[in-house]
Amino acid sequence: MRIVSVVLVHVLLVAVAVVAFVVWGTGADPARASRQVTVPDLDRRLPDNPETLTLVRPPGVLVTDTASIRSGVSPEVLPAAEADVLTGAGVVVVHAYVTHENGVVLGLWQLSIRDGHDPHTALRAIDELYATGGWAPAPTAARGVLVRVQNPARGQPYTGYRAHYVRGRNLIRIEAYGTDRARVADAFAALATRQLTQWPSR
Amino acid sequence: MAVAVTPATGTAPVTLLRAGAAVLGTYGYVLGLLLARHDLNPEPVATIRVWLNRPLGLGEDFGPFAVMLLLAAAGLQPRRLVQVGLSVLATVCVCLFVYEDPARLLAFLPLLLAGYVTWAVVDERLPAWAGVPLGVGCLAVVVAADRAFPGLRPWWYPVAAVFAVLLSLVVVRPGPTAGAVAGHPVTRALAVAAEVPFVAGALLVLVGA
Amino acid sequence: MRYLHGLNLLRIVASVAVFYDHLRGWFASGGQRWTFDENLSAAVLSPVRLDALVGAFGICTFFLVSGVVITFAAQREGPGRFVARRAVRILPAMWVVLLIVWVLASCHVQVGVAGPVDAGDLFANLTLANFFVPNQTGLDLVTWTLGVQIAYYLFVAATIPLLRRWPWLPPALAVTLVSVLLSVVSDESTTATHMLRVIITFLPILFIGQLVALVRLGRLHPLAGLAYGVLQWLLLVRGDLTSDLTPAVPGYARMVVCIALLVIVCCRLSGGLATARWTRGLADRTYAVFLVHVPVLYVTPHLLSTTTGTTPALLIATVATAVLADLLYRFVEVPCVRWYRKWENRGRNSAERAPDDLAGRVEAAR
């Protein structure tokens, strides 16, 4: 085939692709706009944006890993009351690691809030939900972190810790629960220290 | 400048790697570095970062990858001691003046050895069964440096090292087209001056640009 | 056309990678830590950012290698024969595995099938319709990759006449096709559109393999191959940037470049490990391993909680996979291909027969 014909064919093919681009767009999902979470990109020279997943890996056997899935999962995976509160506050996608080790269940959750919603609203809303549920505030030296604890009671053998804080567009949850109170407290403290050292509140 | 390498490797691989290092080094350590120091992200650099750098996992506008290509090329011509010395010196300049972090040498210098091992295998001075583990060992040193120095971890140097080694393995047996590209005057000119962008980047930092 | 022995090594590594990735889920489902993986991830996989991409490495490698070897096959086969040979190669083994899994699931054996199954599920899976029709139970979820492969085969078959005369034209068409389809299929809210988007997103990987083959065959200028390859890679990036769902794991773009470079290097290998008999034997069984390993792993996680520990359980699961894969290869794949070749050559003398040549021997590849 002559060079001219080859060039003309390529021009035609490019034209077809361009027309498709103009008519139908880039291929971006139109529903994305309502779920848009603009992740801060602090250093564009980095090979990856580390703010897309701001969770350390908890120790122990991995029970749940939705953190490796780029799209995460819906907030519907959470208990109904939490899902309602968080969805109302703008949470659109959840990434999480849940593990268990030595009788303690550990969890790290990244709850991403869509653009136009204030992550601190979600922070206050979830903390109030836990307060309403009888979880007592627990002291912490970490700035911007709200910690709640549930102690064992009649018919409820578990000790549980829930800490929430905001980093960028994400509400981060650190949790630990189990029946051995001391072990749960130690595991929670260790996990919270690791998580907050690497990904402090911002 | 005739780059005297053994007949097995020829001059084309070294020329191609050095030319690539020159282009990417200029982009990374002159243009990219200037933009970063002034907190700028103009087009088309912004688009290149989104469409090339991030998908490839090569940060700093290909700068470290360019250093690794330069060193791999130096390793492919072990008899050219002056050339090797210049490449190492350029690397040292980058580590000391651009990064102010000599630890980065541990992430870069293994590529020199990887290039040498590649030369030795291709030139049949070293059997492949020995060369492959040695080459993997070079990558292991980069990985070890990445683990030992937490400041290096966000920059994904092991990823850049893997790319540099694979690219070296591909170009080490160039076909006629690669040979023709390597023989082009522009390519040869870039290869001759491959160390310049890295030294220029270091100088830019020194003069506070 | 020289047989590409080096690609057998890659196929074996890819098979191990996919198996390894699913072993992680196997350990987790058995409630056990896999210390070896934790150590390997920390020491090796995480620094080279392969931690979450082990399975993706395997899949990308299979796609790229398939793109290469199928292009070699297309040089010597007409469209009809091409489609028929590919169908004979992949469908019987898939159907046998799906049928067995369906029977086990119907008998309520824990084989990794979520929920009850009926005849409709079987039919949907046998035709891969389960990936397009909602509320269908998947019997062997790795078969989604065959949807991508089949789409590629159909494109290659349709463009074989063009490939013979103008080898640059199918790659050029492929770039336009993927670009247009990416623009058109943007909504992934339904099962069908999501699967379509998956196929479109991953097709560039096979097309890059096609380009490697065409350059190697001398049918496409290397610079043209590089240009088309860069365009296909950019389409892979575009697919990634414009979707939150597909690919499910980030990092495919850099993986594809690494594997493409590896493929080019491996295409040159012609001695040592690459040409060993056992290499060929293992590589020939990688498709069977791919099909059987997930059901085998789902049947066996309970072994992990025995008092004998995880090592025996791992050995049993691995040996079971190897044995079943070998049985599938020997008693389904090979006989079907042989039977079909006999049927192809019926009534022909030895001079007229379709040669048992490179194209025939790369039947082992998908």
Image (spheres, coloured by chain):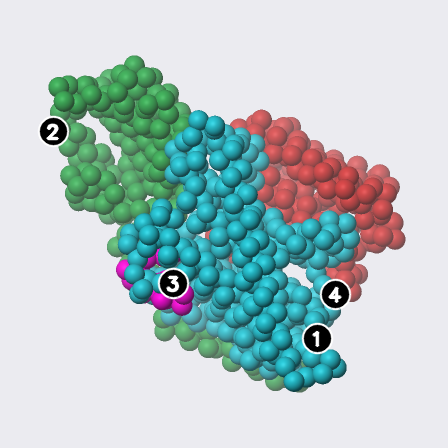
The alpha-carbon separation of the residues under discs 4 and 2 comes to: 73 Å
The answer for how far apart the CA atoms under marks 1 and 2 are is 78 Å
**In terms of secondary structure, where does tag 2 sit?**
helix
Instruction: Note whether C306 is above or below B59 in the view shown.
Output: above
Dot label at residue A132: 2
Q: Report how far apart the C-alphas of labels 3 and 4 lie in the structure.
A: 37 Å
Earlier-in-chain disc, 3 versus 1: 3
Residue C68, percent from left and from top: 62, 64
Quick one: label 4 or label 1, which is nearer the N terminus?
A: 4
Q: Which residue is mark 4?
A: C2
| Chain letter tied to green | A
* Number of the label disc, if any, that sits on residue C125: 3
Distance of label 4 from label 1 (alpha carbons): 14 Å
Q: Which element is circle 1 on?
A: loop
- Name the residue nearer the viewer: B176 or C280: C280
Q: Who is closer to the viewer here, C76 or C363?
A: C363
- Was residue C125 drawn as part of the magenta stretch in this picture? yes
Chain at tag 4: C
Query: Disc 3 marks which amino acid?
Result: Asn
Task: Please name the color used to draw chain B.
Answer: red
- Chain C colour as displayed: cyan
Disc 3 and disc 2: Cα gap in Å?
48 Å
Query: Residue drawn at (34%, 34%), measured in percent from left and top?
Result: A98
Query: Could you give the CA–CA distance between mark 3 and mark 1, rounded to whole angstroms?
Result: 34 Å
For image coordinates 56% across by 40% down, the residue present is C48
C225 above or below B7?
Answer: below
Write down the residue under mark 1. C355
- Tell me which amino acid carries mark 4: Arg
Confirm or deny contact between disc 3 and disc 1 (CB under 8 A): no
Q: Which range of residues does the magenta coloring cover?
A: C123-139
